[in-house]
Image (cartoon, rainbow, N blue to C red):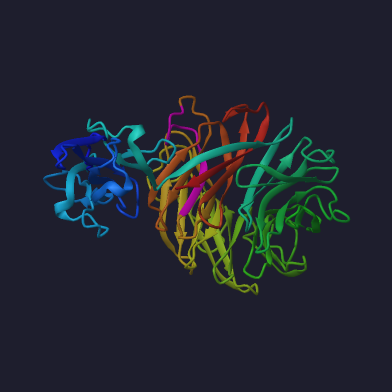
Amino acid sequence: MFKLFLILGSLLFVSCTGNDGKDALQQLTVLSDASAENCPTGGTTVIAGIDSNGNGQLDEGEVTSRQHICNGSEPLTLVTIEEPGENCEFGGSLIQTGLDDNQNGQLDVDEITSFEYVCNDPVLTTVTDEPMCFPGGKTISTGYDHDNNGVLEESEVSSTTYIDCVYLRSTILVGSDLNESNASISTDISGNIIVAGSTDGQMDATPIGMKDVFVRKIDAEGNSIWTKQFGSINNDFVFSSTTDSVGNIYITGTTSGNLEGIGIGVSDAFLRKYDPDGNVIWTKQFGTVAEDNAYSVVTDSLDNVIVAGTTMGSLETSMGYLDGFIRKFNSDGDVLWTRQFGTGNFDRIESVTVGPDDSITACGNTPGNFAGITNGDYDFIATQYSPDGTLIWAKQYGSSGADYITDIASLSDGRVILVGYTTGSLYNQNEGAFDAIAAILSPEGNFISGLQIGSLGDEKFTSVSVGENDEIYLSGTSSSSLYSSNPENYTQPVLLITDPGLFIYESLQLPYSGNTQDISVESSGEMLIVAGTVDASSVDGLSTVLSDVFVSILRKQ
């Protein structure tokens, strides 16, 4: 603001004002004016008059004139965007200041007294491999290069974006001071994780038999919500778990004792239902006088429950020796239908899936002739039934070696994916004793595409899950340095992510000794869970001496 600065005081002028010769004094007084009425922005008042009484000041009656000299208006600052160009190479801001002399509330060109350009620093973007992501995952960092050294330093980063990144967030161990095995996982509608397995120790209650079943519900951060342990006085094993549309939990497996009533045979299959709070709703034990094992459980769109496994007896009609079976229950545990099938040889059903139309497809292995020509020592088989139990198709596939299928999942268009391992050259030249394999079948059961990966060690796919966009998640094991350094050739968990055509775009080898047994994708697709067992190793600082179940939680960015 410009001000008129004058020395406050009196300027005396001497003149002759009368015939008597008496001196008359004319005085000019300059005062600061604080009156908003006279000068809204401040200024100076000049008062003139005749000091008639000679007292050295102008009294009110001696004033002959009064003039207000006001300052300019309030200072204004105008900030505008400066586009990249001559004044600012990377753009910036133009800051202009001045006095609003005409008091129109804006800074006109002729009122500008100073200006300054504040220019942006260069914007840098860096793209790097993300060490917490699978190979292929990238980190994109953006920020201003404030020191103009051409390098985007950590302190200069203003935003970070992850591309195609699935990173290992945490791993927890689930176990007692004894051995745990047979890990199975699933997720519910709230994103909680259900982990089930078998234990020799105490997980919740006093151990009942030689080997009991445990079920633990944990939240997405790995915190335990509740744990349940049950069993007979003999050996009890759990092999699979799933949830329904309201969060109820189903687990299935095998018992050699009495879980519900009287045991029927050497070993029986069982199915148990829990509510979301861990309360048992019902338990079903079923089988023949021989051996019966339930290996897989899924639910359909109506919350019916489908169990698949093997039997050496007659659940329906025996084909001879070891057969596969599928049994469908409603949500109350009532049996809707049972199908039994096989070759008269050692036919083992490993897994079952439900398609978008609620069709049911089971898969497994056989050394016999299930549906066509026997290809090798062992072939993998798949068979599909309609929701009412009508056979739709049965297929047999394989190489000249031994081919084993361990799991199956459905895609949104009715295709299915099978995973396992082979000693043959099924889709590629065999690299070792066992190579991991995956195959896509059409809704009619015809082969579409296959994947075979291996090394000089052993590779196996043990589980598969499909995401909301039909991305495929494969888990398994490797005893070599397939995707990371493994100098001792321990058996380590591996994870692959592919597109619906089995094109691999992400892979990971977890850095501890163990076996993956199950994989699940949370419904939103943002969380991936892998489970298995680890022996005498250290997992993220958690030491295990015997065998524990591990649960690795991975996140997508």
Residue at the farthest front position: 20
Note whether residue 435 is visible: no
- In the image, taking residue 189 as reference, residue 475 lies left or right, namely left
Q: Position of residue 156 (x, y in %)?
A: 33, 35
Relative vertical location of residue 379 with respect to residue 9 in this rendering, above or below: below
Note whether residue 116 is visible: yes
Using the rendered view, name the quadrant where residue 8 is placed: top left
Region rendered in magenta: 472-486
Q: Is residue 474 magenta?
A: yes
Q: Residue at x 47, y 54 (%)?
A: 472
Using the rendered view, name the quadrant where residue 424 is placed: top left
- In the image, taking residue 487 as reference, residue 331 lies left or right, namely right
Quadrant in the picture for the N terminus:
top left
Of 251 and 366, the residue lying toward us: 251
Q: Position of residue 384 (x, y in %)?
A: 57, 67
Q: Position of residue 9 (x, y in %)?
A: 26, 34
Of 344 and 473, the residue lying toward us: 473
Q: Residue at x 56, y 57 (%)?
A: 523
Of 144 and 376, the residue lying toward us: 144
Q: Is residue 304 magenta?
A: no
Figure disc tally: 0
Q: Residue at x 25, y 57 (%)?
A: 103
Q: Position of residue 121 (x, y in %)?
A: 24, 39
- In the image, taking residue 547 as reference, residue 483 lies left or right, namely left
Relative vertical location of residue 108 with respect to residue 87 in this rendering, above or below: below
